[in-house]
Image (spheres, rainbow, N blue to C red):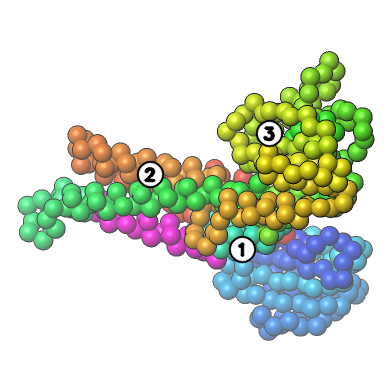
Amino acid sequence: MNERQTFQDTIFALSSGRLPSGVAVVRISGPQVRFVLETIIGSMIIPRTAAYKTFRSRNGDAIDRGLALFFPAPNSFTGEDCAEFHLHGGVAVVERLLEELHAFPGCRIAEAGEFTRRAFTNGKMDLTIAEGLADLIAAETEGQRRLAMQVASGSQRALYTQWRQRLVRARALIEAELDFADEGDVPGSVATQVWTELNNLKNEISQHIESGKRAAMLRDGLHVVIAGAPNAGKSSLLNFLAGREVAIISEEAGTTRDLLEVKLNLGGIPLYVTDTAGLRETESKVEKIGIERALERASEADLVLLLEDMHDPLPVSLEDESVEVWRVGTKWDLARKGGGEWQFQISTKTGENLDQLLDALQGFAEQRIGSINDVVPTRQRHIHLLKSTVTEIETAIVRDDLPLELRAENMRLASQSLGRITGDVDVEEILDVIFSQFCIGK
């Protein structure tokens, strides 16, 4: 089914949360909205004004009483006629209304992200704003919410549009030099002017790409691995950080053989902490696999907490020395001895110095991610296309052995890559991927 045929349908879905709930919101969009609304509530209502009505089936049976709202095109979320039914959030009540909507000719249940996709197709938003909305819905921490809200506000679109305009102007100057080289009103020293501007633009985009690494950390979280010898207190620390019994604690060595992970929210930044198998020489095949996984996860981490029992130290080393490592002395309540070899000395039994470790972890997370107040790329898709933009601009700048026509083509390709981020240029093949990430009813 092509998009034109799809848009002839009127779509509906439950747009609020899981049932049962205090209130449920059913959204409907498309050409049949006015007819459906008049049939169910008995009359039309003032646009964008909530009206308390009885919702009835087509044979006159009352389904529920609640609020109805009507948003006429084009001033609606999707750009089409839209309506909302706010009713009691009982399972039977909502199912009965959905069944009634499905009985109208040309009405069907919406697919995941279809409301937002219609908004994009009707020019109500670009792809970056749509992705920002998806991130806003998925946000679990304050930092993720702030980042998603920044994108959903259209700040990315404004920046990328401005960059495209600069590319278009530079290309226009090059083509003017090609077509009107003998005319007096063509600016002199065009080449110098263009290449200087393009070099500045390339540097701006490159810095923007670098900031995307911090945004990815905020979206996906930082990863901290707890490593050390058996009985170093790794599982006890994980349980303390989680605030619950996640890992089994035992004096028997080798209790933890698989990776155990908990998610923390430190100052609005998501932090994934992983407990790993104790590092030691062993003949157990299962334990060896656990140790291999521990070393592999440690090599991929943003930070490793290397724990050592201060009462009975069994030092271990990690294979990957490029990872940042904090040496943490444990069982401080038994050892009661200082030492410069440990950055932190803690006791999960008494809670001593654990607040210091938590504060340090939050400081580490904030330092890694920083304050994301500027516009940043938030998806790998953005970064890939931005890198393509930089490559084309760089080719146009450095390849002075090429004819101007070819260098102008590089500038056109750079502009096209920027346009693909916002959806202004040839993005049909990625639309299904982007909008399938939304929940039904959005």
> In the picture provided, is 228 more to the left or to the right than 177?
right
Q: Residues within 10 Å of mark 3 (few under 14, many from 20)?
A: many
Q: Which residue is mark 3?
A: 298
Residue at 34% across, 52% down: 201
Residue at 20% across, 38% down: 400
Residue 1 seen in the current view:
no
Q: Which residue is mark 2?
A: 390
- The Cα–Cα distance between marks 1 and 2, rounded to whole angstroms, is 28 Å
Q: Which residue is mark 1?
A: 146
Q: Which residues are magenta?
A: 151-172
Instruction: Identify which amino acid the numbered label 2 is placed on.
Output: Val
Judging depth in this view, the residue of 280 and 80 nearest the camera is 280
> In the picture provided, is 91 more to the left or to the right than 11?
right
Q: Earlier in the sequence, mark 1 or mark 3?
A: 1
Please identify the quadrant where the C terminus is shown: bottom right
> In the picture provided, is 259 more to the left or to the right than 216?
right
Farthest residue in the top direction?
283
